[in-house]
Amino acid sequence: MKNGIVLRGDLIWTEGPDRFRYIEGGYLSMEGGIIKGVSAEPPREGTILDYSGSLIIPGLSDLHLHAPQYSYAGLFMDEELLEWLEHHTFPEEARFADTGYAAKAYGAFVSDLTKGSTTRFSAFATIHREASLLLMRLLEDAGLSGYVGKVSMDRNSPKELSEDTHEAVEEEILFIDEASSFSRVRPIVTPRFIPSCSDELMEALGKIAGERDLPLQSHLDENPSEVEWVRALCPWADSYASAYDRFSALGPRTIMAHCVWPTEKEIGLLASTGTYVAHSPSSNGNLSSGIAPVRTFLEEGVNVGLATDVAGGSSLSMFRMITDSIQVSKLRWRLVDDTRKPLRFPEAFYLASKGGGSFFGKVGSFEPGYDADILVIDDWKGSTVLRSELSVPERLEFYAYRHPEEFISAKFVKGQRII
Ligand code: GUN
Ligand code: FE
């Protein structure tokens, strides 16, 4: 541990969804970007960084967001999904054909993502290869880690945002080849969703992901009109999820955003394939999509993480996603199904850290061998009179519901300090 680093402070993390682990005034050791362990006493070796009095937590993973949509996050929230895509999303995404515009917009996005609570991400870009690579470069230079997908679309899209099928496949292969120059940011195969992708394109993309051993991301069961549309587009499929499955697009390296309206059979398919659900509570409220059955996912063994889905969600804050996921689960319990308990705070924190983090590897915990993704939060800066009376888990809950971003005083990704 000679070259190791040791962070001193109030450590708190989850190893499972049921409860927090914490050490007040503890020591978190890391070396070579990897967590070595936690202890109540100072380890014999390593350079100590003293964050006494601050919370030290694992980094949080945003399993699904749209980088080009950050420019209008917080606007245009009065329509449902399909109208919102047509009226606001597609016109804005079309602007990323201009790399000068993309550089400005992605610059602002990466700057804000860097300052916030997210350490890992899986992002959609747009159909434009050059702008997508530029986004990867900016994220890599900022020290963040995660996936970026050049979006594939060859039908039911405006012509500025549509590729022909052959071109979509060629561009995807070029994108993947050119993206191999990055190390912290990796490519992910990204069919936008079935309505935007012909069967031929879906088949080709599923094959590319398989042959090149790449992850894949898309959208599933977000909105009733969308689900109805897929039924009409894929009369041969049992369900929306089984249509993806037929294109080899489900599995433990796939993220499906939303899953608000799955049937029992679809939940079974998500569980048996190990597919990750990116639960996006803010977005599902803003776009009137509904409330995803997260408790059922957990009971049925579906992998789940949390996601902002910017700009469906208006905030990049993963703390906001933690508290929103709890709030919407309470509404679902009260209004839809009182046999399934709402999420509790440790469970929601687990989904945002180790739950979603597991998509990226050993990410989101302080167990030995995990990547050193760490947030330091100066919650003592708050003016509340109660602070000194609170336990470490209570302080984390208190911070999560208020989440002033300026309290994040240090952020490490794979051991590298980026704030
Ligand atoms: N489904 C297809 N595209 C999108 C998108 O950009 N945002 C959301 N929320 N859902 C989608
Ligand atoms: Fe989305």
Image (cartoon, helix red, strand yellow):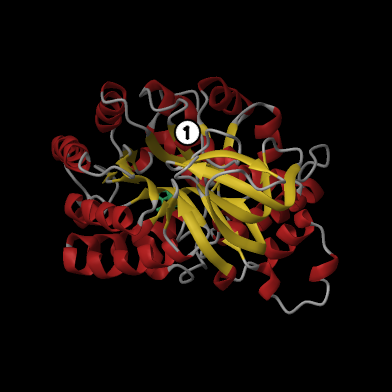
Q: Is residue 52 visible?
A: yes
Above or below 97: residue 40 = above
* Residue 299: percent from left, percent from top: 71, 29
- Circle 1 is placed at which residue position? 361
* Residue 115: percent from left, percent from top: 46, 66
Q: Is residue 120 left or right of residue 108?
A: right
Q: Residues within 10 Å of mark 1 (few under 14, many from 20)?
A: few
Above or below 124: residue 295 = above
What number of labels is visible?
1
Q: State whether label 1 is within 8 Å of ligand 2.
A: no
Tag 1, which secondary structure? Answer: loop
Above or below 174: residue 129 = below
Q: Residue sitting at 83 percent across and 42 percent down?
A: 338
- Amino acid, disc 1: Gly
Camera-side residue of 135 and 192: 135
* Residue 32: percent from left, percent from top: 42, 41
Q: Residue sitting at 74 percent across and 44 percent down?
A: 20
* Residue 251: percent from left, percent from top: 45, 25
